[in-house]
Image (cartoon, coloured by chain):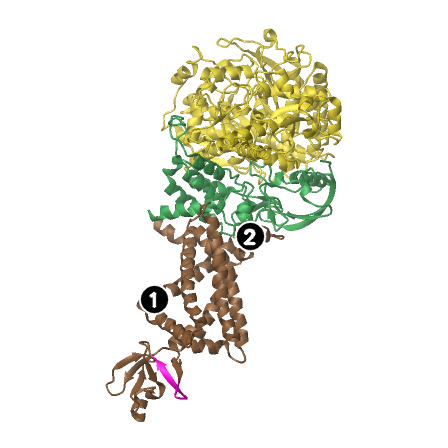
Amino acid sequence: MANSAFLKSSLAKKYWMALTGLFLCLFLIGHLLGNLQLLSTEKYGAALRFNQYAHFMTTNPAVKVLSWLTYISILFHAIDGFWLTVQNRKARPVGYVKNSPSANTTWASRNMALLGSLILLFIVTHMASFWGRMHFDKNMPLYKVEIEAMGQKQSFYQLVNGQFVPVEQVAMSLVEAREKHMPKYIHNKTELFDTNAKIQIGELYKDLYKITVDFFKQPTYGLLYVILYVISMAVLAFHLSHGLASSFQSIGMSHPKYSPFIDKFGLVFSIVVSVLFAILPVYIYFVL
Amino acid sequence: MKLDSKIPEGHISEKWTNHKNHLKLVAPNNRPKIDVIVVGTGLAGASAAASLGEMGYNVKSFCFQDSPRRAHSIAAQGGINAAKNYQNDGDSIYRLFYDTIKGGDYRAREANVHRLAEVSGNIIDQCVAQGVPFARDYGGMLDNRSFGGTQVQRTFYAAGQTGQQLLLGAYSALSRQIGQGNVQQFNRHEMLDIVKVDGKARGIIARNLVTGEIERHSAHAVIIASGGYGNVYFLSTNAMGSNVSAGWKIHKKGALFANPCYVQIHPTCIPVHGTNQSKLTLMSESLRNSGRIWVPKKKEDAEAIRAGKLKPTQIAEEDRDYYLERRYPAFGNLVPRDVASRAAKERCDAGYGIEANDTNEGVYLDFSSEITSKGKQAALVAGDHNPSEAKILELGKKWIEEKYGNLFQMYEKITAENPYETPMKIYPAVHYTMGGVWVDYNLQSTIPGCFVAGEANFSDHGANRLGASALMQGLADGYFVLPYTVSDYLANEIRTGKISTQSAEFDEAEKAVRAQIDKFLNNNGTKSVDHFHKKLGHIMWNKVGMGRNAQGLAEAVKEIDALRAEFHRDVYVPGKADEMNPELEKALRVADFMELGQLMAMDALQRNESCGGHFREEYQDAEGETLRDDENFKFVGAWEYNGEDINKEILNKEDLNYEFIKIAARNYK
Amino acid sequence: MATKYININLKVWRQKDAKAKGQMESYKLDKVSTDSSFLEMLDQLNEQLVNERKEPVAFDHDCREGICGMCSLYINGRAHGPDRFITTCQLHMRSFKDGETIFIEPWRSKAFPVIKDLVVDRSSFDRIQQAGGFVSVNTSGNTIDANATPINKADADRAFEAAACIGCGACVASCKNGSAMLFVGAKVSQYALLPQGKVEAHDRVLNMVRQMDEEGFGNCTNTGACEIECPKGISLENIARMNREYLKASLS
């Protein structure tokens, strides 16, 4: 009895909304820390660090579990939110002729569904642009560095283990390597193999950095993407400004002493996180 | 008619116990076969319905509001008395009994009042067990305060919302029984008549206020707990819907109506402000714990205040007349309500009133002394031995806010004046009616099977009720008296079987109700119900109010008689019978108020003495205090209906015997 | 406090009965005293309508001192009108300007169907209370002495603050989701904070929430409108406490 109520009741929906939301806030922190690598000012630092982060995110088994949790959370949060909205609409079949909701609520708190839908739209396009390419694009570029030696520029792949391998030594496949007598070749997108021994000798980074920078620096749409991205982060800020503190309330964490702090923290979190995210495309477009 | 009060034999402290032990019982297996109707869901009604439902009777509970939780008991502010002696100030059952009899100016039944005092402690235990959040001190124990007419602290309270908390407690008990199916609740239903079969109460006719449907409900016993009749005056502290119809209908079917002239005018209400005013708002008596009542000593100061040229705070201390402290040094501002009200009227009549309305009626209730003294105390407790003036004021106001915050806020909302800065303006207003349906010791009216509880009956408060005693009586009747006495009556009904509503008696009662409704709707008069109600209120307040005299009362009887005729001739009631029709509801209620109003004037006219809330100007001593006539008027005046002409009602007398209290002049000096 | 008079325009929801389709209707009302309460203004309107042989506006009201919870009304887009911590009956006309147009609508909620004009059916609240809003103690009076169990003053005070709810439904009316959680949370909290109520705390919260859901109230999205519009200032903390109590009850 208690268990079924726990899944179906109005309160259960709140708990799920809150727990998934809070988890997604944690994810945001992780994501943001990675993205901030873009700001690194060391030579080659930004690209390397960013790609290292992307590599870590896509290969570490623990992270994989977390990322599945994230996908599920996003889905659950969206579906639960959708049902809540439908139910809440039904609770008031006839609306008011004159209503002054701004007198007692914030705009964000009243528009969580709209904000959430926009964020979902953003997530979908964002994943298509970056996550999708990272995972599925056969032509995903690999990370290389240009090093000047003796007045000559030379390209190297930088491996995960830190070694550098000249680009001209690496073929894109075993067939090509044999044809062109190249000592190494790439197998399975990122694995570096020795042509003779046919054993893996290292792993390459996918160049998400390049994808990212190129994306926002496109001559025709780059600026538009930057603007859309910044707007999306504003939407996220509004969503979080209500959502974070609200999650604590939903799971019953409220106390006259601590709740004001949670409220403030929620607001600061939403602004700081969103602003930091939003800085990156602007930086890429205008500074890089 | 011979009135048998059925007071048990024996010493006063044993009467109730002995009586209870000898009352007949109904076995648990028989109770579900027996129906009981309870009309009204205030403290008395809700607690009776909950208790009887819990015992296993089939209870039908009726209220005209949209929920039982809204009955007007909810508005009681100050508190509830109980002889617990938690404050160790010498309280006891006897003292509560004595204070109540004395407070009622020796016009209440000893046995009933003693029973009330006996069960008072149980009420508090019961309510706490139900989760009523009474105020507590820092040790976690229940807190008490003082109320008028007593010298002990025996009043339990929950801020200024005690009635609300107690009613919600009773409502929760009732809700529990409704949830279990023992009580069937009928919201938005108004009882329009009682049905008698073979002389016994066997059911009611009720109107569904949403659909207008006239319904028949049968039962083996009917309990009326429909409250008081203060709304006869139009302006009172009662709720807009409070009415006497249930009580009046049973009166017309044979229940005697006792002491209708005993009306309590509460001293601390917000003064009248204009002609469109619909009700008066009470400021709890508990405020007299901390507030001092005064008017200017000089008439010219009062005039200047009314003209807006002077502010009360500009009147020097020595120019203020703290008239209650002056006249009654022993009780001071905590004299009983009737005394405080009359004293206010005396000052205003003499020209010292301070309210700038048509009648100049208003006095000050001033908290500045208390703010200063509590502020100093709070500073000391906080370790500040030399607090600044501002600090004292700040701390004092904080103390006041904690104690009376909601009342102060309520006052400010209504008057747009800040009572922390300027004294409250108050004036007496009709509040409670001690009179009501005559009942015997078992709370049974003169109609067998028809019981009456709470404010609707006359039994416990004599000619004046002490503060915080109404809640006590309502719950005592419902929780601790009716379950026993109603069972005793029902013990003879276990073989009766279901009572049919298809009988000539039900037909006739329903027909009469329909006829009255049709009459109003087809009357095609020219004036609204409120027009007549206001006129009635005007007569009542001026001639059957705080000060009464033979001439005025005789005039009032005639004027009301004429007004009643005009009302029935010229009232216009819009709408239809088979729909929600608030104007029709009002018309039906006002019709009963008109008849009762006349009877009140008649009762006041026959009572040639002053006692409690009944003040006849002819009967006062040199200092303006009430002069009772115990030789000729130590009786309950119970009126018997005798046809449409109210003038023909017959007065029956129940003599009051004081065996255990020495009757004396009431003295609060 | 000199009495002033204002003239106002009213737009009032009129609906013949539960089944009829309603609409807003306009009325002009002159010479309204600023000392009148909002309901006294409506009395004045009704007196005018009766004198014009028109049907008066039905609205719920009773105690007219802000405690019975009977009065409702959505005034100019807000439950109980523009001021805080008051019910409609405590709202005074001095809060309005001369010539102002005032919108008056009934509470809107699936669980509060309109009966007539501005009158709605709030018996859903009663049913929630019947599902568990009580302490299961018999009314015999033979309980333990009231002072046998000391109760921490802070808890008693908070229980009282929660118990101050008047059940008017402003929380539902002003919530964009038509949620009743402030009402239910307050009741759950009152008992959860007191030792007497702890015994059956689990069943209570489960049953009351189940009934609340069955009545068709919406869900809480923590907008806080209810707390602002509550005439008794019932705190959102009570909803959090209910959430906590329900979680505890569900997991045990």
Cα distance in 3D space between marks 2 and 1: 38 Å
* Tag 2 subunit: A
Identity of the residue furthest to the left in this view? A197
User: Where residue B627 sits: x, y (%)?
Assistant: 63, 11
Q: Nearer the viewer, residue B600 or B494?
A: B600
Q: Is residue B580 above or below residue C108?
A: above
Query: Label 1 sits on what residue type?
Result: Val
Q: Is B433 positioned to the left or the right of A149 in the image?
A: right
Looking at the rendered structure, the secondary structure element under dot 2 is loop
What tint does the image give chain C?
A: green
Q: Which residue is mark 2?
A: A105
Query: Does the magenta segment cover residue A150?
Result: yes
What tint does the image give chain B?
A: yellow
Q: Which residues are magenta?
A: A148-158
User: Where residue B285 sits: x, y (%)?
Assistant: 57, 26
Mark closer to the chain start, 2 or 1: 1
The answer to whether residue A86 of the structure is visible from this angle is no
Q: Is B107 positioned to the left or the right of A135 in the image?
A: right
Q: Which chain is brown?
A: A
Q: Which residue is mark 1?
A: A63
Q: Residues within 10 Å of mark 2 (few under 14, many from 20)?
A: many
Give me the residue at 65% from left, 39% from top.
C39
Q: Which quadrant holds residue B654?
A: top right
